[in-house]
């Protein structure tokens, strides 16, 4: 899926993380990539995160009823007249045509991309006025949706008491548009928004991004630092001099104590390795994507030699960090690999293309072959079987 034309630099300069943007059908040839029945089918599968939200009449906080999947197929026969919406997370991991929706947004680095959530709503259905912590492109798949935008929210913004939803206690629309198939609304983090289906058969694709919070980074990095610390790494003060007042914690002691923390927490190389692994860990690690049989190295070589394209698993995460001019750290699904020599070009290729072919020479390199086998065997990479 491609855009006819889209000013990437202008978007990044003026809108990304700054303000909303309505983009009227920019696709070369928009076609809704998923049927409602297929979405309902996914919502019935174990391991797929799905929610069904129904709006009854009554007090605002009671009006929104949330059920979590997996659902029994019969559940969808019992949907009444009240507006409802079905939301399924990470549909891109399971449906290649939905994964293809991310392609035109690939000007944003891999490590910021989260997933594509899909919603299907009946007339009047929606998730209510709320704000998200993340950037999102809301792509209208089929049907129509009224999108209303409100003001910027913060952690102090008042929410309705609800166990499952973070609905705004008050919402006033400052702008609104009706989105038709192919139209896109970009919403930056924190902006209040409300989407209401106009008529049945309203499908919206949320191409969502992620950005770690400071508390998440500190908490998870601390765990990693702690895992690698020994008990005898401890404060020491040989050459201690007698103090005028034994009650004082001296400036020198305080600086040394603070330095113990800084030394472990602020090591850029250790942080880079940890962050790449942390950030590329799969979103749903319990799903096993391994092929039935480990790949045969000769079959791998002959597939590459015959020019068969390779495709990254859409559920896999690939990124790299440049440690030096000739040394890259490749991160794939929570693991890191030091890459130099022949492997550098391979790393750059696999991280910037979800589907690619390899030169015979590159694939003849033993370290590249070893990596390929690792990625095939863990289900991160496979020969492309699509048309
Ligand atoms: C929806 O598709 O109904 C909700 C998407 C969102 O507001 O983030
Ligand atoms: Co939202």
Image: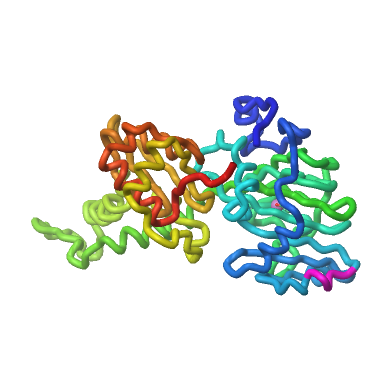
Is residue 79 highlighted in magenta? Answer: yes
Q: Tell which of 51 and 341 is nearer to you.
A: 341
Residue 366 in which image quadrant: top left
**Residue lying at 32% horizontally and 49% vertically, measured from the top left:** 297
Q: Residue 157: image x %, image y %?
A: 70, 56
**Residue lying at 62% horizontally and 39% vertically, measured from the top left:** 17
Part of the protein shown in magenta: 76-80
Residue 22 left/right relative to 99: right
Q: Residue 371: image x %, image y %?
A: 33, 47
**Residue lying at 23% horizontally and 53% vertically, measured from the top left:** 256
Residue 29 left/right relative to 91: right
Q: Quadrant of the C terminus?
A: top right
**Residue lying at 67% horizontally and 70% vertically, measured from the top left:** 69
Is residue 387 highlighted in magenta? Answer: no
Q: Tell which of 98 and 215 is nearer to you.
A: 98
Q: Quadrant of the N terminus?
A: top right
């Amino acid at each position: 899926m491609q855009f006819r034309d889209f000013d990437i630099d202008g978007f990044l300069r003026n809108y990304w993380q700054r303000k909303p943007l309505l983009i009227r059908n920019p696709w070369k040839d928009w076609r809704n990539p998923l049927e409602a029945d297929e979405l309902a089918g996914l919502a019935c599968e174990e391991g797929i995160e799905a929610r069904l939200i129904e709006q009854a009449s009554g007090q605002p906080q009671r009006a929104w009823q949330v059920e979590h999947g997996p659902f029994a197929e019969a559940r969808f026969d019992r949907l009444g007249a009240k507006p409802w919406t079905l939301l399924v997370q990470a549909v891109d991991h399971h449906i290649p045509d939905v994964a293809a929706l991310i392609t035109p947004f690939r000007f944003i680095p891999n490590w910021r991309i989260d997933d594509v959530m899909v919603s299907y709503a009946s007339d009047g259905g929606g998730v209510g006025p709320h704000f998200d912590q993340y950037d999102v492109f809301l792509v209208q798949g089929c049907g129509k949706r009224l999108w209303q935008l409100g003001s910027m929210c913060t952690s102090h913004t008042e929410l309705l008491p609800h166990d499952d939803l973070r609905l705004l206690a008050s919402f006033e629309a400052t702008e609104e548009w009706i989105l038709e198939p192919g139209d896109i609304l970009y919403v930056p983090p924190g902006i209040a928004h409300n989407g209401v289906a106009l008529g049945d058969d309203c499908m919206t694709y949320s191409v969502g991004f992620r950005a770690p919070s400071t508390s998440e980074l500190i908490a998870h990095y601390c765990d990693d630092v702690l895992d690698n610390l020994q008990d005898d790494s401890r404060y020491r003060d040989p050459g201690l001099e007698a103090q005028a007042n034994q009650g004082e914690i001296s400036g020198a002691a305080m600086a040394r104590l603070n330095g113990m923390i800084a030394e472990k927490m602020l090591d850029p190389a250790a942080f880079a390795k940890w962050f790449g692994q942390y950030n590329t860990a799969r979103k749903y690690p319990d799903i096993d994507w391994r092929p039935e049989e480990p790949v045969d190295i000769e079959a791998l070589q002959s597939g590459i030699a015959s020019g068969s394209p390779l495709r990254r698993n859409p559920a896999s995460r690939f990124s790299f960090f440049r440690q030096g001019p000739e040394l890259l750290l490749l991160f794939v699904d929570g693991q890191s690999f030091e890459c130099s020599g022949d492997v550098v070009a391979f790393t750059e290729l696999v991280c910037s293309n979800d589907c690619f072919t390899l030169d015979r020479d590159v694939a003849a390199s033993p370290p590249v072959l070893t990596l390929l086998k690792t990625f095939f065997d863990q289900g991160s990479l496979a020969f492309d079987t699509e048309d």
